[in-house]
Image: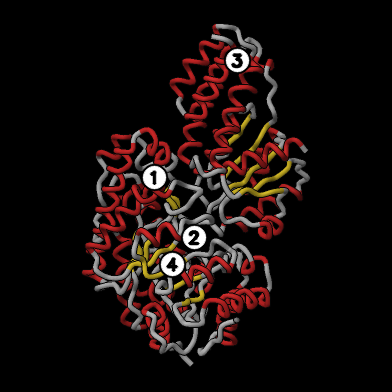
Amino acid sequence: MKEGDLLEKLKNAIVEGDPHKAIEIMNECIKLGINSKEILNKAIVKGAEVAGNLYEKEEFFLADLLMTGDALNAATEILMNSLNEKSEIQSKGKILIGTAEGDVHDIGKSLVISLLQGQGYDIVDLGSDVPPEEFLRKAKEINPVIIGISGLMTMSISKMQETVNLLKNENIPSRIIVGGGILSKESCEMIGADDFAKDGWEGVKKINNLIKI
Amino acid sequence: MGHDWVGSVNRIFRTISGSKRIDKVPFLAFAGEQMICRVTGKTVRELYSSPKIYANAIIQTFEFLNADSINVPSAYAGPSEGLAFAEANNRLDVIKWFDYQTLMVKQGEICKTEEDIEKLEIPDHGKNNLWKNSLEAAKLINEKTQFPQVISLSIWSVVQELRGIEAYKDMRRDPELLLKLCERIYESQMDIYENWLEIVGMPPNVFIAGYSFNKHMMSFPDAMKYEGQFIKRMMKKINVPFMLHNCGTSPYIDEVFKEIDFIAINGSHPLDIEFWIDFKKRFPKVTIIGANIDVSRELLTGTPSDVEEKVKENILNLAPGGRYICCPVCSLPWGVPIPNILAIPRAIEKYGHYPINTLD
């Protein structure tokens, strides 16, 4: 099979959210010695994009995106293990992510992590119910490009604001995005974040945009 | 002067039934544990410690807010149901308690594996302390205010608590397993209902927290499969009118109302008031409890005047003809300034007395 066809098949397996098929095709790609950057950009990142577009058109739903995330991560793991030098594919940047203190919901956050990890970002997940001080401590330690604070409940807004204030007062230079269905332009401004996303896929897109800026 | 609960009961239930004998637009508020703690200064554990303390604190809070509605926040299939399942399955380690807000369940821990679902024990709500106290508190509120307590049930919010993110993956890889879990949760909801009947009495309505009816989360056929069909079964068993609560930001509204016979919709999205004006025309017998007063907007970031304008917009557009209850959605969180909340009943007093003329 031609390289292009194989990458197309891998992309489709990712869009379809079939981790087994993705692993099988990925192993074939490795065996054929296909350039890792080609695999990442033409199959893995592209697959996530196609799935995301289908989600925007309401042809895909959260379940489909999560399955895409599983296939994407299965493929990426093989790709990374196959590299002699991990630096062959440069990390797109470190992202620190967690759910605001007092909130334990993590479905949206898990989707964001799943889709970003497979696209070459280094993700540090602080988990849920994360105090502002913990965001600060970890930000100082790893110097992330982006800090993502997630929350499902309206009451998370005040904790997000507290966290952003603390990070800014301590001169953390990272860009901050907050995520959750409860957020609005007004509440994002009140929180003091650089941007906000109402769902997981929007979060992925906005993080990609924030990193480009 | 004390709160006129009899007036409130008439206002709310006459509005829902479509009666024209209403003095003014009712105000329905969602005051969760956070708001009750804020008003009374008590911690959540203090509230939950006895039905009497809890009921009095709830009454104090709703009267302070000048609301026409009153309910026990923990008597709903949210975190309390997670706690009941955690206790029944020896997983209290997944419960996170807070001083001034409701407890939470770490999502996806109780039903992490297929085996967990197979062996899932249904809670006995009559024996669970929090449920017992919540139901007793509901009974006391019934007695003290004469406001008949509405039971709140749900399927999907409990699925998310028990199974977490895996529930969504199950939709694609093992729908039968997910349906099995939904079935168990349905059984548990019916146990809540049985206990409610025994302790509180027959509810006037069922308030369904239908979180699955949200485009961000799943397709409409999936929402019907994993929640809608169970609601239809509840309707057959519990012979009182059902209302739908959906605080999602991209809800299926038309779709649901064509499929399920709810008598009221409680939500804040879409935010476009035109949608709600049109909805009222298309579903004239459905009471709107809302409509676009979102707690994360004017209430949180605006001024009392902003809130007043929003309430006025809702009243003038949706109250003429009745079947409209003013309600910010959803639960009033810690950060919302109290003057903004109190601006709602004030605005109702100003603009919400019947007869209210249509704008056009």
Between marks 1 and 4 in the image, the one whose residue lies nearer the viewer: 4
Query: Residue A29 shows which numbered tag?
Result: none
Query: Residue B247 shows which numbered tag?
Result: 2
Q: Which residue is mark 4?
A: B265
Disc 4 crowd, CA 10 A, few/some/many (<14, 14-19, 20+): many
Query: Which residue is most to the bottom?
Result: B1
Tell me where residue B18 appears, x and y as whole percent.
39, 80
Tell me where residue B71 appears, x and y as whole percent.
40, 72
Q: Residue at x 46, y 56 (%)?
A: B252
Q: Quadrant of residue B127?
A: bottom left
Is residue B49 visible in this depiction of the protein?
no
The C terminus of chain A lies in which quarter of the figure?
top right
Where B337 sits versus A3, above or below? below
Is disc 3 on the same chain as disc 4?
A: no
Q: Residue at x 70, y 59 (%)?
A: A190
Q: Earlier in the sequence, mark 1 or mark 4?
A: 1
Q: Which residue is mark 3?
A: A4
